[in-house]
Image (tube, helix red, strand yellow):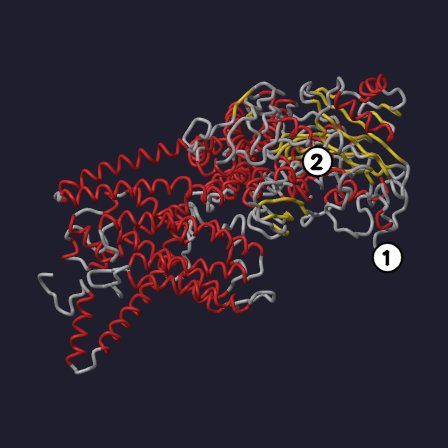
């Protein structure tokens, strides 16, 4: 017997506990079942791409902190790499190592939040996320040690990094690296084999690899669908070609696999960090730029104003959320002519409708958690 | 290491299939005729280049023209390339939508429409995405609000060589 | 009670009240006066205890959850934050109780009251100590089940009258859940009732102290089912589906604020206390503790046990994720209910053998306990396997690690969430 029912619309967000910011999901429901989903975004739109056209290349670095505010270091890195690519700057080796260390620490910290809030979306009452925030705090302490800021780091510079790490940084990192694998093991025990988490997330929002590629998904979303594609391996930047690590892939393409991929990547990040701590070299941390591109203040090591040649560049890195790309067009001026951010969590939302329709409202929350959006990056 | 395909290489490949389609080829990109875009993109996706993954789609306002830039990656061959299309139409630039080729272009085309005012024909759901319906103008365009002294290019910074700066104080928008 | 069985013997407050009743009768009052007076004393006592307990347990729960979260918890109001519950209560009292414009006003106001009253009335049948039961009904446990179901109406009234879709979904979920789990709860109780042969709450305690065994040692399956059903009934994690904060914000009480919300909040605590009280009475020997009740007031033993059971609920809340509604329902209908049928069958047979054979309790009860434990564990594992749990394909799996760039590892298999 089928009961006659009338569809109704429910607004999940913009103020809702599990939309991870001011994100709004307009669901048309039939009982508990979703028959149509539409996302409404832009509540955090800060017009970064327009603002960046009004600021010099160096002034734009803080913007990249604030797009993906859970992964400021990788945002910095992608942006400065795009400018470096345009200016053909070779970054000194030590700067590359520092960038790698910071990016991997950031990946761990970001995945802590991603996995923790995913567990929250599955209904744990804050416990995993609180424990993961503890580990994230320790990483933020390291950031504070390196650059004085915890969240919006503004650490990378075009041509290198803003300052060298203090001597106590590497010992502190070593202590942390001894501690964190135990923690990750704890989280795996708590979450990975948790019957309820498996029941809640397995088979939810399945995407085949063909779909994942067609929808331009990247990062854990793509790898969760079984595509072994990681820009750190595919297109090594910074010092990633010198370290060994594995790509974590899922086999089912569901929410659980994305979560498992993130868990595995946390361990891989630690593996990379251990190698970095061993292999880091001494040397300069900033490239010398040619004086023609440095104006009007002519310090080639710490330039205030940079004038890249006319042209365009697209640089991408593997941010915790996926392929973070910066497309920058220069007209030879001191500010970008066009500044475009290819935001992974924005594009990862493309198949949201496909993933949520047919599921229940409880699943929709899990789907959102598995996409791991940061609304600052979605809206920019 | 991802191989960056030069625009000339891509142009060469396209020209073998669609001789008329390529307008210009630079090291960074290959400029394609807008009306051939869907054919070219389908060819790029299914042909030897195997560009199954659309990295990024964005629009650039060159003042005399609007450009759409496509960056594509082939995951199996680990190579990357870029094509562009361009129009000199300023009031209502219309381009074909590539959502039928790469569904991943869906949100990015909506973004380009929202901020740059570019209409993608054949897009299933072309609406504003960040701004609200009824927002006046297309904010990422260089002539947005027509602010005096707000010039594109080098002139927009004080102390930069170029035209005399009229200042931002006399905006009456 | 060998020594000190005087009215001032605080080990047994029932005794003290009995002495008071006698005193009142001695003064020449009509018969109904001591009855009413003792009733009033009992009600006021229970209410006071409930309020104090609740305020303390708000603090305990938040501190314990804080410890589980690796943080401190409330520590500002009063010494060690002990007055946090008081501060919360004052805040709720002083806050404006907003009534949204499009609500069904009468129902909206009635729902908090309707949920609050049954949560308190249940305590009438719970024996806190020997002779310390407000109303020693012959069908006490049935009364508990019946009154416990009333909150369904209140919850639905709250959800419906709020004119909020989240609230309505929450209310609908609550009804579906209660219908499923009421059955499990009743069947779990039925096993105990069969064995004891009575529905009076006091009889359960006396049976357990008389046979020197706690019921949960004999019927573990019933206890587990009863706790799970109770979790659903009182809406606590992992079964807080009708107020799932990550999905429905606050479920059926989304629109409530101020003291009206306070009623829901308090009712949840009261219902949980009542549930713990019934668990202690039915399965854990009530106020008895192998002779310790001779020396320690029975109600203190009872309360200690009750708080210990409450801690399990806090623990579950701090640990477990939440199930989806269909999974929770499936768990009831496909798993718990069947196990309860088996439990009743086995317990019934055992009781029949015991009664007909006229065996000594000391000889048969260990045998029954052994049989039931083996059966409980075996059945649970077997039935879970039957439903596809605990197999290799349903187990958690780490992500595959690979060096092979661009390869595709998709298998497309994998069972959807059960």
The mark closer to the camera, 2 or 1, is 2
Residue A164, position as x, y percentages in the image: 59, 33
A138 left or right of B56 in image: left
Secondary-structure class at tag 2:
strand
Q: Residue under mark 1: which chain is it in?
A: B
For the residue pair A157 and A379, the one nearer the viewer reads as A379
Residue at image location 14% in from the left, 42% down from the top: C357
Can the viewer see residue C12? Answer: yes
Query: Which numbered circle lies on residue A342?
Result: 2
**Which residue shows up at 81% across the image and 46% down it?**
B138
- Tell me the crowding category of disc 1: few under 14, some 14 to 19, or many 20 or more residues within 10 angstroms, Cα based: few
Q: Quadrant of residue C373?
A: top left
Relative to C304, A243 lies left or right: right
Residues at discs 2 and 1 in contact (Cβ within 8 Å): no
On screen, A96 above or below C34?
above
**Is residue A369 found left or right of C36 in the rendered image?**
right
Return the residue at label 1.
B172
Vertical placement of residue A14 versus C371, above or below: below
The 10 Å Cα crowd at callout 2, few under 14, some 14 to 19, many 20 or more, is many
Mark 2–mark 1 Cα distance, whole angstroms, equals 34 Å
Q: How many numbered callouts?
A: 2
Name the quarter where the N terminus of chain C is drawn: bottom left
Instruction: Quadrant for residue B126, please give it.
Output: top right
Identify the disc placed on residue A221.
none
Q: Give the side of residue A8 with respect to residue A305, left or right.
A: left
Task: Kindly indicate the quadrant of the structure image that contains residue A312.
Answer: top right
Toward the left, the furthest residue is: C2
Residue C82 at least partly seen: no
Residue lying at 21% horizontally and 39% vertically, measured from the top left: C368
**Label 2 is found on which chain of the structure?**
A
């Amino acid at each position: 017997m089928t009961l006659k029912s009338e569809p109704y619309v429910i607004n999940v967000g913009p103020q809702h506990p599990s939309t991870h910011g001011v994100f709004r999901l307009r669901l048309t429901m039939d009982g508990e079942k979703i028959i149509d989903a539409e996302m409404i975004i832009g509540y955090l739109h800060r017009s970064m791409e327009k603002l960046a056209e009004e600021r010099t290349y160096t002034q734009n670095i803080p913007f990249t902190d604030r797009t993906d505010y859970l992964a400021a270091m990788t945002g910095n890195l992608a942006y400065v790499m795009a400018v470096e690519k345009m200016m053909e700057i070779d970054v000194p080796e030590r700067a590359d190592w520092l960038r790698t260390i910071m990016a991997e620490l950031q990946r761990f910290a970001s995945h802590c939040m991603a996995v923790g809030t995913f567990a929250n979306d599955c209904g744990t009452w804050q416990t995993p996320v609180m424990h993961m925030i503890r580990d994230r705090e320790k990483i933020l302490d390291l950031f504070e040690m390196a650059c004085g800021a915890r969240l919006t780091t503004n650490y990378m510079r075009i041509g290198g990094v803003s300052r060298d790490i203090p001597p106590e940084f590497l010992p502190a990192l070593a202590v942390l690296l001894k501690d964190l694998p135990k923690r990750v093991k704890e989280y795996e025990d708590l979450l990975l084999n948790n019957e309820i988490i498996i029941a809640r997330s397995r088979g939810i929002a399945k995407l085949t690899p063909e779909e994942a590629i067609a929808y331009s998904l990247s990062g854990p979303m793509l790898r969760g669908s079984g595509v072994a594609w990681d820009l750190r391996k595919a297109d090594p930047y910074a010092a990633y070609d010198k370290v060994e690590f594995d790509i974590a892939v899922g086999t089912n393409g569901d929410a659980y696999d994305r979560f498992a991929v993130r868990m595995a990547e946390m361990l891989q990040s630690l593996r990379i960090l251990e190698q970095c701590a061993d292999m880091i070299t001494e040397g300069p941390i900033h490239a010398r730029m040619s004086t023609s591109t440095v104006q009007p203040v002519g310090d080639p090591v710490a330039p205030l104003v940079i004038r890249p040649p006319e042209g365009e560049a697209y640089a991408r890195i593997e941010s915790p959320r996926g392929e973070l790309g910066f497309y920058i067009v220069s007209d030879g001026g001191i500010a970008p002519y066009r500044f475009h951010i290819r935001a992974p969590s924005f594009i990862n939302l493309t198949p949201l409708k496909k993933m949520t329709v047919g599921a229940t409202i409880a699943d929709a929350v899990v789907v959102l958690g598995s996409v791991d959006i940061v609304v600052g990056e979605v809206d920019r | 290491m991802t191989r960056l395909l030069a625009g000339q290489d891509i142009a060469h490949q396209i020209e073998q299939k669609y001789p008329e389609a390529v307008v210009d080829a630079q090291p960074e990109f290959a400029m394609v005729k807008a009306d051939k875009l869907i054919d070219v993109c389908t060819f790029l996706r299914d042909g030897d280049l195997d560009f199954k993954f659309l990295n990024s789609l964005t629009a650039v306002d060159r003042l005399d023209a609007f450009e759409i830039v496509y960056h594509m990656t082939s995951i199996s061959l680990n190579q990357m390339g870029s094509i562009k299309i361009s129009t000199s139409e300023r009031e209502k630039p219309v381009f074909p939508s590539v959502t039928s080729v790469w569904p991943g272009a869906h949100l990015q085309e909506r973004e380009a429409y929202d901020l740059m005012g570019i209409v993608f024909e054949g897009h299933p759901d072309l609406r504003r995405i960040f701004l609200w319906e009824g927002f006046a103008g297309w904010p990422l365009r260089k002539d947005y609000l027509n602010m005096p002294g707000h010039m594109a290019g080098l002139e927009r910074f004080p102390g930069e060589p170029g035209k005399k700066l009229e200042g931002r104080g006399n905006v009456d928008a | 009670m060998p020594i000190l069985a005087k009215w001032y013997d605080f080990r047994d407050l029932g005794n003290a009240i009995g002495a008071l009743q006698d005193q009142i009768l001695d003064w020449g009052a009509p018969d109904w006066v001591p009855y009413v007076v003792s009733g009033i004393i009992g009600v006021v006592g229970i209410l006071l205890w409930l309020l104090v307990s609740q305020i303390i347990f708000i603090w305990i729960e938040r501190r314990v959850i804080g410890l589980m979260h690796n943080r401190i918890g409330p520590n500002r109001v009063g010494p060690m934050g002990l007055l946090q519950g008081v501060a919360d209560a004052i805040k709720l009292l002083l806050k404006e109780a907003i009534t949204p414009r499009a609500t069904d006003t009468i129902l909206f106001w009635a729902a908090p009251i309707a949920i609050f009253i049954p949560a308190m009335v249940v305590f009438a049948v719970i024996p806190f100590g020997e002779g310390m039961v407000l109303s020693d009904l012959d069908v006490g446990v049935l009364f508990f089940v019946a009154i416990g179901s009333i909150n369904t109406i209140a919850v639905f009234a709250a959800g419906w009258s709020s004119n909020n879709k989240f609230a309505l979904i929450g209310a609908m979920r609550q009804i579906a859940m209660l219908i499923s789990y009421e059955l499990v709860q009743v069947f779990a109780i039925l096993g105990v009732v069969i064995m004891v042969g009575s529905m009076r709450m006091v009889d359960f305690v006396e049976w357990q102290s008389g046979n020197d065994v706690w019921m949960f040692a004999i019927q573990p399956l019933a206890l587990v089912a009863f706790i799970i059903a109770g979790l659903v009934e009182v809406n606590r994690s992992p079964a807080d589906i009708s107020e799932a904060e990550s999905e429905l914000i606050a479920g059926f009480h989304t629109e409530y604020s101020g003291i009206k919300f306070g009623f829901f909040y308090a009712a949840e605590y009261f219902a949980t206390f009542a549930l713990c009280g019934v668990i202690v009475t039915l399965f854990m020997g009530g106020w008895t503790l192998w002779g310790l009740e001779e020396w320690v007031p029975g109600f203190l033993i009872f309360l200690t046990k009750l708080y210990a059971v409450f801690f399990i609920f806090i623990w579950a809340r701090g640990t477990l994720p939440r199930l989806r509604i269909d999974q929770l329902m499936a768990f009831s209908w496909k798993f718990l209910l069947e196990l309860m049928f088996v439990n009743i069958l086995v317990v019934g047979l055992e009781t029949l053998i015991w009664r007909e054979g006229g065996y000594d309790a000391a000889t048969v009860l260990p045998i029954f306990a052994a049989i039931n434990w083996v059966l409980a564990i075996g059945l649970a594992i077997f039935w879970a396997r039957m439903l596809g749990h605990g197999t290799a394909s349903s187990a958690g799996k780490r992500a595959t690690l690979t060096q092979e760039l661009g390869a595709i590892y998709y298998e497309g298999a994998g069972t959807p969430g059960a």
